[in-house]
Amino acid sequence: LATLEAAPEYLGGGRFSTEPRAALRAFARIYAGWAMSQDWYRAELHLSGTNAATLEEFLTDVWEPGFLRRPAADLYAQACTWIASDISDNEMYRGDLVRALNSIRARVLLLPGRTDLYFPVADNAADIPHLAHAELRPIPSIWGHRAGSPKDNEGDLDFLRRAVDGWMR
């Protein structure tokens, strides 16, 4: 959020006078370091899956344009949603996350990416003891936060199909 809030175009409250292009480019570069894992970059998937010859070319020509097409207010709202996504932050549970998790009776299949830097497997593993009917199956992927995104990623898609098929039986 601080990257977007530092933009001269930022008006407060998640609003902008105009699209903050420089801040969106900076936001994109920060996100690039978190979206995919270090192993993904080491395997040079940023080069082999694109026409980029260098990391800089990948960031400038492939990664940043995706963020420049998005309204800054939407990215701001998405980040705020992540920050505020506590299922126990309400009158019923009053911040008691364990109690909120214990109240879930549905079957839950948790499929975090093994290399996700935003939502690490350890976070889901900590929830498992408090969920009545849950199973944790980390996606064995180097795609970081994008693990399980089927586009150009047959291995992850196959894993998801098998995991969900097995879970539904």
Image (cartoon, grey):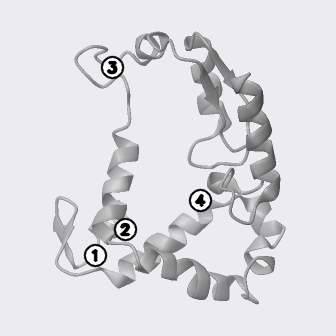
- Contact, CB < 8 Å: mark 2 with mark 3? no
Camera-side mark, 2 or 4:
4
In the structure shown, which secondary structural element does the residue marked by tag 1 occupy?
A: loop
The residue beneath circle 1 is 7
Measuring from the top left, give residue 45's x and y in whole percent.
78, 71
Measuring from the top left, give residue 135's x and y in whole percent.
69, 22
- Contact, CB < 8 Å: mark 1 with mark 4? no
Chain-order first, disc 2 or disc 3: 2
Q: Name the quadrant of the C terminus.
A: top right
**Up-down relation of residue 154 to residue 57 (above or below):** above
Q: Is residue 76 left or right of residue 150?
A: left
Chain-order first, disc 1 or disc 4: 1
CA separation in Å, label 3 and label 4 = 28 Å
The residue beneath circle 4 is 34
The residue beneath circle 2 is 3
In the structure shown, which secondary structural element does the residue marked by tag 3 occupy?
A: loop
